[in-house]
Image: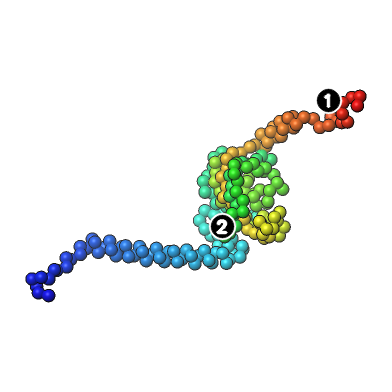
Amino acid sequence: MSSVTAVPLQPVKKSVRIWIWLGVVIAIAAAFGLAWMGTREQVMTKMTNEEFLAWNKTKPNVKTTASGLQYEILKDGEGPTAQEGGAVFLNYEGTFRDGKLFDKSQQPTPFPVQDGASIPGFYEALKLMKKGGEYRLWIPANLAYGERTPDPTRLPPNSMLIFKVSVDRLMTPAEVQAMMQMQQQMQGPPPGAEGAPPQGGAPGQ
C-alpha cells in the first residue's frame, strides 16, 4: 500500500485508553464476583446447621443470644419493646436455609408474648421487637420444632427456620386483658351462671 493511499490510524487518546482498561477490569471483577457468589451459595447449602450458624454469627449486625437465637435489626422500631403478656402484630415470611418458603402472612397476625404460645426461638424474638421495626431471625432447630413438627411434610424434622418480620403494632398486657374481657362479655355468661337461663329449654317443657 502506497503512502498516498494509506489511511493512518489515529492515536487513541490517553483518557479513552483508561476507560477501556477500566471497563475490562470491571468486567473481570464482575465475572469473579458471580463465580464467587455461586461457590459461596453451594458451600452454604452444604453446611450443617451448626456450621451455618457459626459462620452467620460473624456477619456484621447479626446478634446471637445466650440461647443461640440469631437476629438482625433491618429497621429499628420506636417505643418500648413487647411485654410479657402482651401481643405483637406481625407481617412475616418464613423460609428454610435454601430459600424455600414454608409460611407467609396475608395480613398483620397477632402473636401472644407468652411462653408456650409459639416456638421458643420465636417467643424469645418477640420480646426484642418494637413497633415499626423489621427483623430477620435465624432460629436453630432446637429452638424451633426439633424432631417433632406439626407437619413433617411441610416442616421437616430438625429444620432451622429463617423469618423476616415487620411489626405492625404492639398491644400491652392491659390491652390484651381488656380485649379478652370484651370478648367474654360479647359471648355472654356460660350456661348455668347467675342470670342465665338453665339448660334444657324453656320452663314448662
Q: What's the distance in space between the residues labelled 2 and 1, CA to CA?
A: 56 Å
Say which residue appears at 57% left-offset and 50% top-offset. 164
Q: Position of residue 67 (x, y in %)?
A: 65, 55
Coloration mode: rainbow
Q: Residue at x 52, y 49 (%)?
A: 74
In the displayed structure, 165 sits above or below 171; it is below
- Reading the chain from its start, which is encountered first: label 2 or label 1? 2
Label 1: which secondary element = loop
Residue 85: x percent and y percent? 69, 40
Judging from the image, what secondary structure is the residue with disc 2 in? loop
User: Which residue is identified by label 1?
Assistant: 195
Say few, some or many: other residues with alpha carbon within 10 Å of mark 2 (under 14 / 14 to 19 / 20 or more): few
Determine which residue is flagged by label 2: 99
Graded by Cα atoms within 10 Å as few (under 14), some (14 to 19) or many (20 or more), the crowding at tag 1 reads few
Q: Is residue 136 above or below residue 30?
A: above
What is the tally of numbered marks visible in this picture?
Answer: 2
Residue 20: assigned label: none
Residue extending furthest left?
4
Answer left or right for 181 relative to 131. Answer: right
Q: Residue 96, percent across and down?
A: 60, 57
Q: In the figure, 203 relative to 143: above or below?
A: above
Q: Amino acid at mark 2?
A: Gly
The N terminus lies in quadrant: bottom left
What residue occupies the far front of the structure in this picture?
Answer: 205
Give residue 181's position: percent from left, percent from top: 72, 32
**Residue 88 lies in what quarter of the image?**
top right
* Amino acid beneath label 1: Gly
Quarter of the image where the C terminus is located: top right
- Left or right: residue 19 versus residue 75 is left
